[in-house]
Image: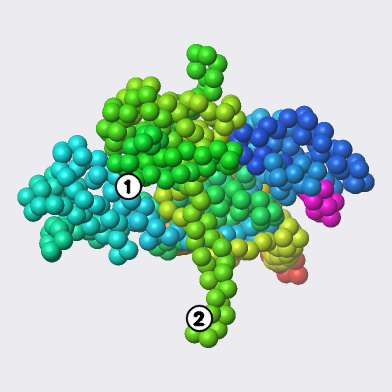
Amino acid sequence: MLNRYPLWKSLLIVFALALGGLYALPNLYPDDLAVQVSGASSATPIDEFVLTQADEALAAAGLVSKAAELSDNSVLVRFADSDTQLRGKAVIADALGDDYVAALNLAPTTPDWLTNMGAGPMKLGLDLRGGVHFLLEVDMVQAVAQRLDVYVSEIKSILRTEKLRYRSVIHQDDGSLRIKFTSAEVRDQARSELKSSYSEFLMNAEEDGEGYYLNITLNESSVREIEDYAVNQNLTTLRNRVNELGVAEPLVQRQGRNRIVVQLPGIQDTAAAKRVLGATANLEFRLEAKAGNSSFSTETYNFRTTPARTAVLEKDIIITGNSVSNAQSNFDENGMPQVNIDLDAQGGKLMNRVTRNAVKRRMAVIFVEHKSRQKVQEVDGELVSVRQPYVEKSIISLATIQTALGNSFRITGLDGAGEASELALLLRAGSLAAPIYFVEERTVGPSLGQQNIDLGVTSVQIGLALVVIFMLVFYSVFGIIANLALAFNLMLVLAVMSLLGATLTLPGIAGIVLTVGMAVDANVLIFSRIKEELRNGLPAQSAIHAGYERAFTTIFDANITTLLVAVILYGVGTGPVKGFAVTLSIGIITSMFTAIMVSRAMVNGVYGGRRLHDIKIWPLWGTDNKSADQ
């Protein structure tokens, strides 16, 4: 019988729509405006005392919160409006002090029963939710310079091990290393030894009246590899630090050769975000200098937690934090805090080479921060602000080497569990392979984000209303079916985006608006085909069947070509273009399902299995088609 679906197919369509409705439902629960309180460091405790302090501070200021709760090692305070949220954030930050970070955020209100099923609302991008945008630049010169500093220590160690006497190893300003020897024979032996260990080195020999020299530079491919590694390592480290903020759907991506874009939706506190991201730090492992031994160059450093305490360390670097692959904090057999560290293969080799001759000596872990300050100076007769980089170094651990170390070892002698936890987190997250500097920062306020949402929703409503009216006027009962199919299509778009965890941006809303127009296009083709078949004298049931069957190829071809364009846009585009491509692609797929399958099921429900005398498909002001079914 024409225009009748088997029961299994009808049930499958109903199930798909019900499932879509379930996963689209969380989008009806708007997020609460909130202030999130987290520790300034991973070791800062977040407990009921912090929650009580926040509540008492708000009460003293006469501010009322909707709710306050402990969640994911942070305090979340919800507010009814943005004005109270902004004032509450300032009050909480002032009450808790510098040990805690108070930041504006949004708190979900999705019921637990939906959350337990894995259902959640769509993520909103920076342009809709508000937040902060940073553009950071990686110092490529310093990336190469830091790697060369490590090479200096390695070369000195190799030369000492092979008993090749040298006078100095100098890292020159032009980015090369210059080693001075006492004889040409020793220089040539050193050249042969280093060439076998370092294929990336370009070497040439020189000599003058003062000595014999070996000049070392990195080849071009190695320099490019170091620069790419620095950017990629910084990307990984920044992502780990952003995760500490608990931001939903952050964006951390490379832009160009040496820049990184960071977008944090829902965060309005630029200073707090910069404090987390801007810790442009690295780690260095060095031996403590022996008392009375002047054969090694030494430097004196303060301790990070107790600046009045100092230690004298050898200048040679054993390894940096780039060699650490994993770190976990726990307690030793005496209940004292320690950090268990795993190194990569090269790092383990270097650590073993140094520490096998340094048992019972102490090794320091140095925290190296690359910072910059703005300095006004005169350039070509004009006063300009110039970025002046500088470095701060401090000791975070000084522990005794109990045995020769390899790929795995432990750091003891820490002040407490908090310091051990923070050190492990820092090592595990990875240090920055090169300094980064903030070159641009912008704040998108929540009011602007809400305005974008309101305008986007309005555009969807207007587009939807015009399409609904058009379909009702031109296609009568079939128009009602097409409008219902369109509503199901929008529901499925929301459900799929929520399930995939896709981020909705302003261009994404434009994609939804376009989907509204395109969604009924297939039904227009089908209904026009049905009218044409009726004009050719086919009975009503046959005309409906022919309309759906013969229009399918045209609909499929048109949507596939558009889908291919959307996929290409996603592949080559960035940021907003990707957001548009995602919603457009999802909209095309769901619209084909609703326009062909769902609308056909509804038409079958209205007209299928009946003897038809007329079909309400002509314009309301026209004459209904009247035809007896065969």
Residue lying at the far left of the rendered structure: 185
Magenta residues (range): 81-91
- Residue bearing mark 1: 150
- Residue 567 is covered by the magenta coloring: no
Q: Residue 619's quadrant in the figure? A: bottom right
Apparent side of residue 459 relative to residue 387 in the rendered image (left or right): right
Would you say the magenta stretch is mainly helix, strand or loop?
A: helix
SS at badge 2: strand
Pointer 2 residue: 379
Q: Percent x, y for residue 361? A: 38, 28
For badge 2, the amino acid type reads Val
Secondary structure category for the residue under label 1: helix
Question: How many labels were placed on the picture?
Answer: 2
Say which of 84 and 606 sits in front: 84
Disc number for residue 322: none
Q: Quadrant of residue 524?
A: bottom right
Residue drawn at x 46%, y 44% as measured from the top left = 300
